[in-house]
Image (tube, rainbow, N blue to C red):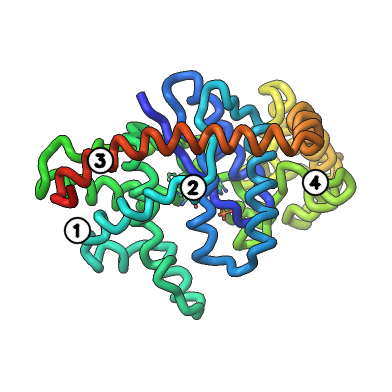
Amino acid sequence: MRILTGLQPSGKLHIGNYFGAMEPAVKLQEEGEAFYFIADYHAMSSTADPSALRENVKELALDFLACGLNPEKAFFFRQSDVPQVNELAWILSSVCPMGLLERCHSYKDKLARGLSANHALFAYPVLMAADILLYDANLVPVGEDQKQHLEVTRDLVGKINDLYGSETLVLPEARIRDEVAKVPGLDGQKMSKSYNNTIPMFGAQKKMRKLVMKIETDSTPVEAPKPTENSIIIDLYRFFASESEQAQMKADFEAGGFGYGDFKQRLFDAYWEYFTPMRERRTELEADESYVNQVLTDGAERAREEASKVLTRVREAVGLS
Ligand code: ADP
Ligand code: TRP
């Protein structure tokens, strides 16, 4: 089985990215041949800052390795180190109806927010399909928000295979874990870089504590019992705390006598402890830039080998060779 996923280097990763995408990817590397990459071409649809792009790529590589991506098991590479993906994207483009892309949320959201979308943003799902299909991936672990892109990918496989033969492309499947499909942010909406409501995975202790203290709560007085339903604190705590710690927090909510500040402190402590081993690993990796670069260079080399096999097959099928 081939497992593949990509993450965009578009800013500091947060705990939603971790539980929605990275942790499942790290677990899955044990179950098959894994291809994990840094989607730097995709980031260009929303960034035009070369030094920020370079910096974000570096940070993402450190984050992913610190979280347990094992380069002995998974191929880890930069998307742009395998430029063949653009050729496959072009081939897919030529069977992709405009309407399919016009219906995509990421594009529609940008337009709705009054931004002028560029062609890269419009064509984003086609490049993403190419990312997946270039490696004959079977399973794609992603968060809920990427579901539509996987559907586009599957539609494109259907069109290509109908036109050029059923063996041309492999049909992938999304793996979306329900319980982590949507990690809430500080305001209770989906945690997202674009909503400015994130808790980063890594950051200075004081600053991170301050963020946790900003979680929105109601104005129930300290002495009174507090509602456990729809509590952002409880929803986040379950990611970091044991069953018994969670039960204790719920009981204390219901009993009254504890302020929200106290619960936030417990959440912060659990969060900080959870990421401590990864934080330490990240510090080691930061000091070893050449190791990180070597991992990406080796990963890209292997990825290019696989990509060229698939591309040879597709070029043949469509009549380019
Ligand atoms: P963001 O919304 O912060 O820009 P991305 O769109 O770059 O995040 O998402 C990267 C990966 O992390 C995707 O697989 C996405 O589904 C997952 N993800 C992002 N936010 C969350 C969240 N709040 N809960 C669960 N998964 C998430
Ligand atoms: N669109 C994904 C995101 O924003 C990143 C991505 C690009 C991706 N190519 C991919 C994810 C291929 C899975 C497979 O998170």
For the residue labelled by badge 2, is the local secondary structure a helix, a strand or a loop? Answer: helix
Give the residue drawn at x 82%, y 34%.
Answer: 269
Q: Nearer the viewer, mark 2 or mark 1?
A: 2
Residue type, numbered disc 4 = Gly
The residue wearing badge 3 is: 312
Looking at the picture, how far across and down is residue 282, in whole percent?
76, 34
Q: Do labels 4 and 2 touch, CB within 8 Å?
A: no
> What is the spatial separation of the Cα atoms under label 2 and label 1, in whole angstroms?
23 Å
The answer to whether 86 appears left or right of 29 in the picture is left
Residue type, numbered disc 3 = Thr
Residue type, numbered disc 2 = Gln
**Mark before the other along the chain sequence, 1 or 4:** 1
Question: Residue 250 versus residue 196: which sits nearer the camera?
Answer: 196
For the residue labelled by badge 4, is the local secondary structure a helix, a strand or a loop? Answer: loop
The residue wearing badge 1 is: 95
The answer to whether 164 appears left or right of 82 in the picture is left
Q: Nearer the viewer, mark 1 or mark 4?
A: 1
> What is the spatial separation of the Cα atoms under label 4 and label 2, in whole angstroms?
26 Å
**Mark before the other along the chain sequence, 4 or 3:** 4
The residue wearing badge 4 is: 203
Question: Residue 26 versus residue 112: which sits nearer the camera?
Answer: 26
Is there any visible trace of residue 176 in the rendered image? Answer: no
Which image quadrant for residue 240?
top right
Mark 2 CB lies closer than 8 A to ligand 2 = yes
Mark 4 CB lies closer than 8 A to ligand 1 = no
**Mark before the other along the chain sequence, 2 or 1:** 2
For the residue labelled by badge 1, is the local secondary structure a helix, a strand or a loop? Answer: loop
Q: Nearer the viewer, mark 2 or mark 3?
A: 3
Residue type, numbered disc 1 = Val
Looking at the picture, how far across and down is residue 211, in whole percent?
79, 52
